[in-house]
Image: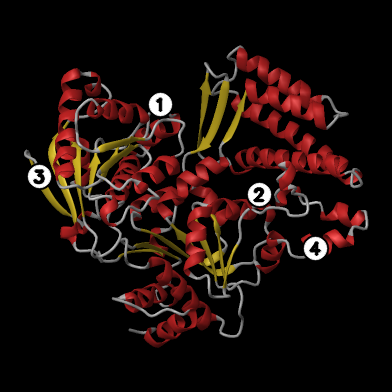
Amino acid sequence: MKYFFQTLEAYGKLGFKPRDNQVEYVSEIVTAFLDEGYQNLILNAPTGTGKSIIAAVAAEVIKKIRDPYTDPCASFILMGTNVLAKQYADTFDKHEDFTLIKGANNYKCTALTDEASGVIENAESCAIQLFKENNMDDVIREHCWNCKYRLERERKNLARQLITNYSYFFVDRMYADTLEKRDITIWDEAHTLNDVFTEHNAIYFSVKRLKAINEEISESLDLTDPTPFNTFKKISADLKAKKVNDGNYIQYATALQQAYSTISKQAKAKADSAIKSFSKYKKLSKLYKKYQGLSCKIDDLLLYKYEHVFEFDEKEESVSIKPIFVGTMFEKLVHSEFNLFMSATVSERFLLETLLLDPAKTKFVKLPATFPTENKKIVFLSPINLNYKSLQEDSTKKQLNASVEKIILKHAGLKESGIILTPSFVLTESIASAISKHDSKIKIFEHVKGEKLEVILSKFKAYNKPAVLISPSLFEGIDLPGAMSRFQILVKAPFPSLAEKRMKFILEKHPEIYNLTVLMRIIQGAGRSVRSKDDWCITYALDQSIVRLWNSPQNVWKDEFSVNFSQFLM
């Protein structure tokens, strides 16, 4: 093992002790980058492997070997959300080498906030220039010098390991370019990278939005150039007349980009001239940043000409333009010599195709499962053919509801709680309604549309008797260890809706990627309730499509589970 001693030294520096085969895994990552010539490594690391520590140690070893005399800029550590970024940062909260930074709207501005009167301002409303202009040195000393956002921005290029979310990184790489280059970028939960990027870069406009923009700039900006108003009026009229289509939408996007740019420039100029008035300065600064962002998104579409879909909703009189994949845009995002993509469910084929990685420069490593497979049981219980058409039939719904109720009754008798994972709120409501009519001896917590998951999840966790939580939002991002969940029901394969044009395009042009998207979500869902080596749970799958996907060659995760096909509930 070539980098054995360097790895042990890095563990000591970070304050951790290696367990199981982590030293071997770190050495394999470092060897791939430094000796084998790979630029990208896709690491499939099952839950319990300790991928967060493995990645941080690997980054430390690489930095130490390549540049032993320079402290900062070892790695970017990226997450899909602020919540996950915070969890990662908490792992290393006692180590000064790790710094977490988020967008300005995540930091409260104490100088401008007056909680007694209900005025809450964040760092996006920063008025330090106004304070300086008005000689408010006491305010600057009390608030600005200790501003958490300002301090973290100052530290971001001094931090050895910089933790942030995907969106912050996207904005900086595409527009700001304030981040120093680093040795390695760690893309955690890499299976979500495409979805986060797609939504981040999506372009939307509608009659309703354009009306709101008109009102906003009329009230706040007093534009001297009427061109933006004329542009919005023309586009709104054409949306209502259904004139925007596949052949001309780029013309409308171009016109919008020019209008947004005009608004942004004038808002910036007026903000600078209103430096003596806080209320005007704050409002105009927000307008400048908002319309600069909208302009940049369309500018990216026009500049990079990335593969995308155009969709016009006649009922809503709205347009959406979305990237298909990150694709060629990934080259713009890369800011390190090495990229480590990792997740408990990440596919080599998925990332190669969606990020257009060079196969010759990309290595795939799948770490062995750390949890006993007998603790992660999958039972295909009399699976039936479930699709939109079959679910309209009373016989199918009756059979499905009967299977769900049998499982619930069995575990209620064992005084065990569990969860039901559905692909939609429609199916959630249907199943919850059916099983609630019977005396199931178990409390049903239904996640209804419009309710935040954390609200119903908290109620479920706090309930100290057998209960079942049913929701379409349980496939990723939640942990239900121990007695919180001893059984799971995967009702139906979570196929993305083909009503969304982007997903229909992917199914037609990239069917393997479409199926991989569903399969990765199934595997994610199957892991919600087993969070340690001693934990255990039974997952029941009721859909034949889950069986088909499970048995496909794409399923590189099947060895992490023990599988049983049964017509009867044991």
Q: CA distance from mark 2 to mark 1?
A: 33 Å
Q: Quadrant of residue 72?
A: bottom right
Amino acid type, callout 4: Glu
Q: Which residue is mark 1?
A: 499
- Give the structural element (helix, strand or loop) at label 1: loop
Residue at horizontal 65 percent and vertical 72 percent from the top:
158
Relative image position of residue 261 (x, y in whole percent):
75, 37
Residue 386 relative to residue 310: left or right: left
Q: Which residue is mark 2?
A: 105
Q: Which residue is mark 4?
A: 142
Q: CA distance from mark 3 to mark 4?
A: 66 Å
Residue 135 relative to residue 242: left or right: right
Q: Quadrant of the C terminus?
A: top left
> Is disc 3 in contact with disc 4, using a CB cutoff of under 8 Å?
no
> Is disc 3 in contact with disc 2, using a CB cutoff of under 8 Å?
no
Does the image show residue 495? no
Within 10 angstroms of label 1, few (less than 14), some, or many (20 or more) residues? few
